[in-house]
Image (cartoon, rainbow, N blue to C red):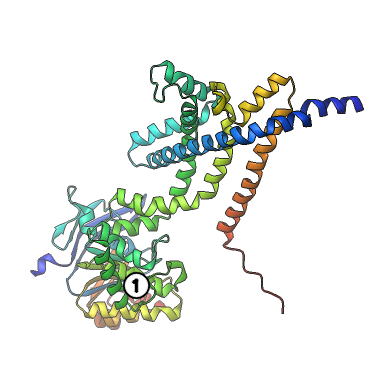
């Protein structure tokens, strides 16, 4: 029994190894993971908003096309999409970013996130009341103006919390880019931890990376939940000071 | 202006929701520089008729002529016509993400293409007219219902419409706030605005209207000047309706 516990400790929680890999994780892995997640999210937001507008478009072909995109990218395993785009595009001669694997990784995750964010945006855009649209059209605004000045600004506000929640998923999702083979300075948290785990024949570096992921994602999750509660219930009333 | 270019004319308007006929062969003249009030029980089709005047609802058959333009023609630019037909809704429908000032100025900038400063000046002037000076930086939700409806009226008036449509503009207001909004509508009527007003305010209809329409079950039952319609109702249905509401 004790021996088993000891073995678990040695395999997953080798303090010596964790301390040794930590500086590299924090100096290289953390910024890379964060920037990758941010880039992918920015691509996803831009793409997602356009696709969401397409999804609620009254022009059927556009709607069907956008629905296709969302269904396919949400329906495929992310690992497969990342492979297809990250490895496939350069293979097909579409070397948009030369041999910068990092950029292909951001693009691949961004394209996937675009599909998820399109559904979030769609829900937001559709939550804008009909009366808002009627009021805008009654003033002589065109469909496009109504979308741009009335529906989009109000729809986006309502989905800011779920969008931030999606960003948390993206942070975790970036772990898959190790598949594409990153150079030493480009490696994200997971790649660094995995390389170190293989070199040392010990899983403790992965545990170390796990702690960093948790330090990012758990506080953000609580922040988003609090934010959503605030949006739903209004700001918490100021507590009166006792006399 | 030649009389035929003003006002609204509905000709043989038909409209159904599924099996329910909500507008059944409506023909109506809304003369310019006059207030026409439509009264009737709920479900009589009066709001639907009003919403046809700027094609928020599209009739299945019939013709609608607004300010000399046949808006039911398929190739007509409805956005251009809508920008000259003001509409005020029961539930205000102010733009929630914009300040009071921007609510009024937005269409001036985007539809009328006025420069921002000019649009805001005109918006401020209109807000002043409806008694809302000093509230232009507020959000709509910070205002009372009566104030919100006055912003909505200012928003419509800022476009300098040829015609104003009111769809039960005071029905969602607390009783003590109704008066202020009705006073603005009355001033507007006296100033010679062409108005089509769906309302439950019988006193307003009697005092401000030039003609009153009574609708029931998708049909116009009676049309008359207010004194005649209220004091000498011809049909049993109107008599019954007035007994219930007065």
B207 horizontally vs A85: left or right: left
Q: Position of residue A75 (x, y in %)?
A: 52, 28
Q: Can the viewer see residue B159 in this picture?
A: yes
A226 horizontally vs B115: left or right: right
Tell me if residue A135 comes above or below residue A240 in the rendering. Answer: above
Instruction: Examine the image and state in which quarter residue B47 appears.
Output: bottom left
Given residues A61 and A180, the one toward you in this image is A180
Identify the residue at the far right of this view: A1
- Residue at position x 35%, y 50% in the image: A148
- Residue at position x 41%, y 22% in the image: A98
Q: Position of residue A200 (x, y in %)?
A: 72, 20
Q: Position of residue A196 (x, y in %)?
A: 68, 24
The N terminus of chain A is located in which quarter?
Answer: top right
Q: Can the viewer see residue B246 in this picture?
A: no
Identify the residue at the far left of this view: B2
- Residue at position x 45%, y 74% in the image: B144
Q: Position of residue B180 (x, y in %)?
A: 37, 80
The residue carrying mark 1 is: B199
Q: Residues within 10 Å of mark 1 (few under 14, many from 20)?
A: many
Given residues A128 and B221, the one toward you in this image is A128
Q: What chain is tagged by disc 1?
A: B
Tell me if residue B169 comes above or below residue A6 in the rendering. Answer: below
Tell me if residue B245 comes above or below residue A230 in the rendering. Answer: below
Tell me if residue A77 comes above or below residue B176 in the rendering. Answer: above
- Residue at position x 54%, y 28% in the image: A186
């Amino acid at each position: 029994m004790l021996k088993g516990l000891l073995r678990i400790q040695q395999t997953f929680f080798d303090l010596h190894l964790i301390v040794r890999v930590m500086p590299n994780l924090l100096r290289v892995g953390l910024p890379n993971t964060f920037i990758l997640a941010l880039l992918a999210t920015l691509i996803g937001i831009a793409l997602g908003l356009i696709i969401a507008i397409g999804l609620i478009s009254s022009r059927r072909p556009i709607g069907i096309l956008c629905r296709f995109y969302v269904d396919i990218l949400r329906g495929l395993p992310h690992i497969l999409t990342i492979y297809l785009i990250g490895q496939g595009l350069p293979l097909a001669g579409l070397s948009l970013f030369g041999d910068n694997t990092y950029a292909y990784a951001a693009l691949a995750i961004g394209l996937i996130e675009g599909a998820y964010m399109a559904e979030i945006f769609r829900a937001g855009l559709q939550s804008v009341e009909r009366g808002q649209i009627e009021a805008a059209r009654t003033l002589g605004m065109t469909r496009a103006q109504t979308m741009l000045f009335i529906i989009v600004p109000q729809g986006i506000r309502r989905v800011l919390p779920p969008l931030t929640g999606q960003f948390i998923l993206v942070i975790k999702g970036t772990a898959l880019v190790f598949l594409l083979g990153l150079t030493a300075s480009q490696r994200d948290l997971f790649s660094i931890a995995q390389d170190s785990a293989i070199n040392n024949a010990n899983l403790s570096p992965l545990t170390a990376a796990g702690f960093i992921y948790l330090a990012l994602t758990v506080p953000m999750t609580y922040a988003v939940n609090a934010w959503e509660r605030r949006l739903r219930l209004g700001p918490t009333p100021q507590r009166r000071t006792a006399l | 202006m030649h009389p035929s270019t003003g006002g609204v004319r509905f000709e043989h308007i038909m409209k159904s929701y599924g099996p329910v006929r909500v507008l059944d062969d409506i023909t109506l003249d809304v003369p310019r520089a006059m207030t026409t009030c439509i009264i009737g029980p709920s479900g009589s089709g009066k709001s639907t008729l009003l919403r046809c005047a700027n094609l928020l609802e599209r009739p299945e058959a019939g013709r609608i002529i607004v300010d000399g333009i046949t808006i039911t023609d398929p190739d007509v630019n409805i956005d251009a016509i809508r920008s000259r037909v003001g509409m005020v809704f029961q539930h205000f429908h102010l733009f929630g993400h914009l300040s009071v000032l921007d609510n009024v100025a937005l269409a001036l900038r985007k539809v009328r293409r006025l420069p921002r400063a000019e649009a805001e000046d005109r918006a401020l002037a209109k807000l002043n007219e409806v008694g809302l000076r000093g509230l232009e930086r507020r959000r709509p939700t910070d205002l009372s219902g009566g104030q919100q409806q006055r912003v909505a009226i200012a928003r419509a008036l800022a476009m300098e419409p040829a015609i104003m449509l009111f769809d039960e503009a005071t029905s969602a207001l607390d009783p003590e706030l109704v008066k202020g909004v009705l006073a603005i509508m009355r001033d507007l009527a006296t100033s010679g605005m062409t108005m089509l007003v769906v309302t439950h305010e019988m006193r307003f209809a009697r005092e401000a209207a030039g003609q009153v329409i009574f609708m029931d079950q998708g049909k116009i039952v009676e049309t008359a000047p207010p004194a005649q319609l209220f004091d000498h109702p011809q049909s049993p249905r109107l008599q019954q309706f007035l007994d219930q509401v007065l």
